[in-house]
Protein backbone atom coordinates (compact mmCIF):
# COMPACT_ATOMS: atom_id res chain seq x y z
CA UNK A 1 0.00 0.00 0.00
CA UNK A 2 1.19 3.50 -0.86
CA UNK A 3 0.00 6.92 0.33
CA UNK A 4 -1.33 8.98 -2.59
CA UNK A 5 -2.88 11.91 -0.70
CA UNK A 6 -3.07 13.53 2.72
CA UNK A 7 -6.03 15.54 4.02
CA UNK A 8 -6.54 17.63 7.12
CA UNK A 9 -10.28 16.90 7.35
CA UNK A 10 -12.18 13.64 7.47
CA UNK A 11 -14.79 15.00 5.07
CA UNK A 12 -12.26 15.63 2.30
CA UNK A 13 -10.61 12.25 2.91
CA UNK A 14 -13.90 10.38 2.59
CA UNK A 15 -14.83 12.28 -0.57
CA UNK A 16 -11.49 11.25 -2.09
CA UNK A 17 -12.06 7.67 -0.92
CA UNK A 18 -15.48 7.58 -2.59
CA UNK A 19 -14.06 8.89 -5.87
CA UNK A 20 -11.30 6.30 -5.92
CA UNK A 21 -13.63 3.44 -4.98
CA UNK A 22 -16.01 4.51 -7.75
CA UNK A 23 -13.09 3.99 -10.15
CA UNK A 24 -12.63 0.46 -8.80
CA UNK A 25 -9.57 1.21 -6.65
CA UNK A 26 -9.30 -0.39 -3.22
CA UNK A 27 -8.80 2.41 -0.66
CA UNK A 28 -7.66 2.41 2.95
CA UNK A 29 -7.98 5.54 5.08
CA UNK A 30 -5.21 5.73 7.65
CA UNK A 31 -6.34 8.10 10.38
CA UNK A 32 -4.60 6.39 13.29
CA UNK A 33 -2.23 9.35 13.77
CA UNK A 34 -4.88 12.06 13.18
CA UNK A 35 -4.79 13.29 16.79
CA UNK A 36 -1.04 13.92 16.56
CA UNK A 37 -0.45 14.94 12.93
CA UNK A 38 -3.88 16.40 12.03
CA UNK A 39 -3.65 14.59 8.69
CA UNK A 40 -5.40 11.59 7.20
CA UNK A 41 -3.56 9.46 4.65
CA UNK A 42 -5.27 7.89 1.64
CA UNK A 43 -3.52 4.58 0.95
CA UNK A 44 -4.02 2.33 -2.07
CA UNK A 45 -2.24 -0.61 -3.75
CA UNK A 46 0.89 0.59 -5.58
CA UNK A 47 -0.38 -0.75 -8.91
CA UNK A 48 -3.14 1.92 -8.95
CA UNK A 49 -1.03 4.88 -7.76
CA UNK A 50 -0.86 6.74 -11.10
CA UNK A 51 -4.57 6.32 -11.78
CA UNK A 52 -5.47 7.48 -8.25
CA UNK A 53 -3.24 10.56 -8.44
CA UNK A 54 -4.80 11.46 -11.78
CA UNK A 55 -8.34 11.12 -10.40
CA UNK A 56 -7.55 13.23 -7.34
CA UNK A 57 -5.75 15.87 -9.44
CA UNK A 58 -8.73 16.08 -11.82
CA UNK A 59 -11.05 16.54 -8.85
CA UNK A 60 -8.97 19.41 -7.47
CA UNK A 61 -8.91 21.16 -10.84
CA UNK A 62 -12.64 20.67 -11.32
CA UNK A 63 -13.54 22.08 -7.91
CA UNK A 64 -10.97 24.83 -7.52
CA UNK A 65 -9.70 25.59 -10.99
CA UNK A 66 -6.05 26.02 -11.78
CA UNK A 67 -5.69 29.44 -10.10
CA UNK A 68 -4.20 27.89 -6.96
CA UNK A 69 -7.17 28.26 -4.65
CA UNK A 70 -6.21 25.27 -2.53
CA UNK A 71 -4.20 25.18 0.64
CA UNK A 72 -1.83 22.49 1.87
CA UNK A 73 -3.07 18.91 1.49
CA UNK A 74 -5.42 20.01 -1.31
CA UNK A 75 -8.08 21.50 1.00
CA UNK A 76 -10.05 24.53 -0.10
CA UNK A 77 -8.90 27.77 1.50
CA UNK A 78 -12.26 29.37 2.07
CA UNK A 79 -15.38 27.87 0.56
CA UNK A 80 -15.63 24.65 2.57
CA UNK A 81 -14.34 26.25 5.76
CA UNK A 82 -17.08 28.90 5.55
CA UNK A 83 -19.73 26.16 5.59
CA UNK A 84 -18.12 24.48 8.57
CA UNK A 85 -17.80 27.84 10.35
CA UNK A 86 -21.52 28.49 9.77
CA UNK A 87 -22.53 25.07 11.10
CA UNK A 88 -20.23 25.34 14.12
CA UNK A 89 -21.52 28.82 14.97
CA UNK A 90 -25.13 27.76 14.60
CA UNK A 91 -24.57 24.70 16.74
CA UNK A 92 -22.89 26.70 19.48
CA UNK A 93 -25.76 29.19 19.52
CA UNK A 94 -28.31 26.36 19.76
CA UNK A 95 -26.35 24.89 22.68
CA UNK A 96 -26.27 28.28 24.41
CA UNK A 97 -29.96 28.88 23.78
CA UNK A 98 -30.98 25.50 25.18
CA UNK A 99 -28.72 26.00 28.20
CA UNK A 100 -30.21 29.46 28.81
CA UNK A 101 -33.74 28.05 28.43
CA UNK A 102 -33.02 25.37 31.04
CA UNK A 103 -31.57 27.90 33.48
CA UNK A 104 -34.46 30.33 33.00
CA UNK A 105 -37.00 27.54 33.42
CA UNK A 106 -35.85 27.24 37.05
CA UNK A 107 -37.02 30.84 37.53
CA UNK A 108 -40.33 30.25 35.75
CA UNK A 109 -39.39 31.85 32.41
CA UNK A 110 -40.23 29.64 29.42
CA UNK A 111 -38.35 30.22 26.14
CA UNK A 112 -39.86 28.72 22.97
CA UNK A 113 -38.18 25.46 21.95
CA UNK A 114 -40.05 24.68 18.73
CA UNK A 115 -38.26 23.90 15.44
CA UNK A 116 -38.87 27.40 14.08
CA UNK A 117 -37.28 29.20 17.04
CA UNK A 118 -34.34 26.76 17.17
CA UNK A 119 -33.86 27.13 13.40
CA UNK A 120 -33.83 30.90 13.76
CA UNK A 121 -31.24 30.69 16.55
CA UNK A 122 -29.11 28.38 14.38
CA UNK A 123 -29.34 30.74 11.40
CA UNK A 124 -28.43 33.81 13.46
CA UNK A 125 -25.53 31.99 15.15
CA UNK A 126 -24.19 30.74 11.82
CA UNK A 127 -24.39 34.16 10.20
CA UNK A 128 -22.72 35.86 13.16
CA UNK A 129 -19.92 33.28 12.99
CA UNK A 130 -19.40 34.04 9.31
CA UNK A 131 -19.48 37.80 9.82
CA UNK A 132 -17.27 38.03 12.89
CA UNK A 133 -15.27 34.79 12.77
CA UNK A 134 -14.61 34.28 9.07
CA UNK A 135 -12.03 36.74 7.71
CA UNK A 136 -10.05 37.08 10.91
CA UNK A 137 -9.83 33.32 11.46
CA UNK A 138 -8.95 32.59 7.83
CA UNK A 139 -6.27 35.26 7.50
CA UNK A 140 -4.47 34.22 10.66
CA UNK A 141 -4.40 30.56 9.55
CA UNK A 142 -2.96 31.31 6.13
CA UNK A 143 0.21 32.99 7.47
Image (cartoon, grey):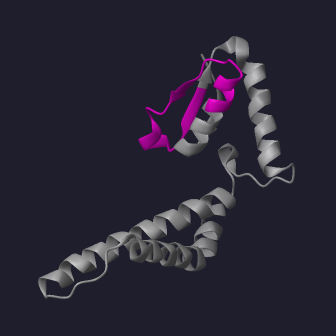
Looking at the picture, does residue 46 appear above or below residue 106?
above
**Residue 138, quarter of picture:** bottom right
Decide which of 38, 14 is in the foreground and name it: 14
Decide which of 91, 77 is in the foreground and name it: 91
Range shown magenta: 18-42
Looking at the picture, does residue 7 appear above or below residue 43?
below
Looking at the picture, does residue 113 appear above or below residue 44?
below
Residue 81 image offset from top left, x and y in percent:
61, 59
Q: Residue at x 33, y 77 (%)?
A: 97
Q: Residue furthest right?
A: 66
On the picture, is 56 further left or further right than 67? left
| Membership of 31 in magenta stretch | yes
Decide which of 122, 58 is in the foreground and name it: 122
Q: Residue at x 54, y 67 (%)?
A: 86
Looking at the picture, does residue 139 appear above or below residue 131?
above
Where does the N terminus fall, quadrant-wise? top right
Decide which of 7, 19 is in the foreground and name it: 19
Residue 127 image offset from top left, x and y in percent:
56, 76
Residue 142 image offset from top left, x and y in percent:
66, 62
| Membership of 54 in magenta stretch | no
Residue 98 image offset from top left, x and y in percent:
29, 73
On the picture, is 23 further left or further right than 118? right
On the picture, is 115 further left or further right than 73? left
Where does the C terminus fall, quadrant-wise? bottom right
Q: Residue furthest top?
A: 47
Q: Residue at x 64, y 74 (%)?
A: 135
**Residue 119, quarter of picture:** bottom left
Amino acid sequence: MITVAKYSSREEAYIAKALLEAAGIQVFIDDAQFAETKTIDIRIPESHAEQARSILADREETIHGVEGKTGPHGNPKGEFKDILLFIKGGGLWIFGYVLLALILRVFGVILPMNPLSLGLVFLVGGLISLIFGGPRGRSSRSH
